[in-house]
Image (cartoon, grey):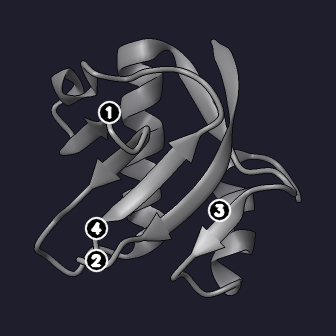
Amino acid sequence: MKDTSILEIGLDSDRTFYVRPAAGSFEFIYRAGMGVRWDEARKVLTFRDPRDVPNIDRLGFVVAACAQEYGVRLSVDASTSLTNLPETFRADADAFTGRAS
């Protein structure tokens, strides 16, 4: 499995959860069937669910879809920025992706 850092995790103005990977293009991520999409213009993976899904679970869907469809393991590191998310999210994301920041 190929490792790729996450540059940014956030919520945009319409409350869509997104993950910006350091490398790669994921235009066929929808094939994983997990509700994750690739926004080519912004180079981000998005997950929009109308239900009240916790952000750490949203990250879980994105990470799982990348692993399943592309064999890519996304991980948080010290340089990962958070946008419109509480700083407390970092510890959960670090633990979830298996890296300490």
Tell me which numbered mark, 3 or 2, is placed earlier along the sequence.
2
- Residue 22, given in percent of the width and then of the height, sits at 65, 34
- Distance Cα–Cα, label 1 vs label 2: 18 Å
Q: Residue furthest front?
A: 41
Instruction: Find numbered disc 2 in the image and state the secondary structure of the residue it sits on.
Output: loop
Q: Residue at x 14, y 76 (%)?
A: 51
Q: Which residue is mark 4?
A: 16
**Residue 54 position by quadrant:** bottom left
Q: Residue at x 28, y 22 (%)?
A: 27
Establish if 19 lies above or below 28: below
Badge 4 density bin: few <14, some 14–19, many ≥20, Cα 10 Å: few
Dot 4 amino acid type: Thr
Instruction: Find numbered disc 1 in the image and state the secondary structure of the residue it sits on.
Output: loop
- Distance Cα–Cα, label 1 vs label 4: 15 Å
Disc nearest the viewer among 4 and 3: 4
Establish if 4 lies above or below 2: below
Q: Which residue is mark 3?
A: 93
Establish if 68 lies above or below 74: above
- Distance Cα–Cα, label 1 vs label 3: 24 Å
Tell me which numbered mark, 1 or 4, is placed earlier along the sequence.
4
Q: Which residue is mark 2?
A: 15
Tell me which numbered mark, 1 or 2, is placed earlier along the sequence.
2
Q: Residue at x 70, y 84 (%)?
A: 87
**Residue 4 position by quadrant:** top right
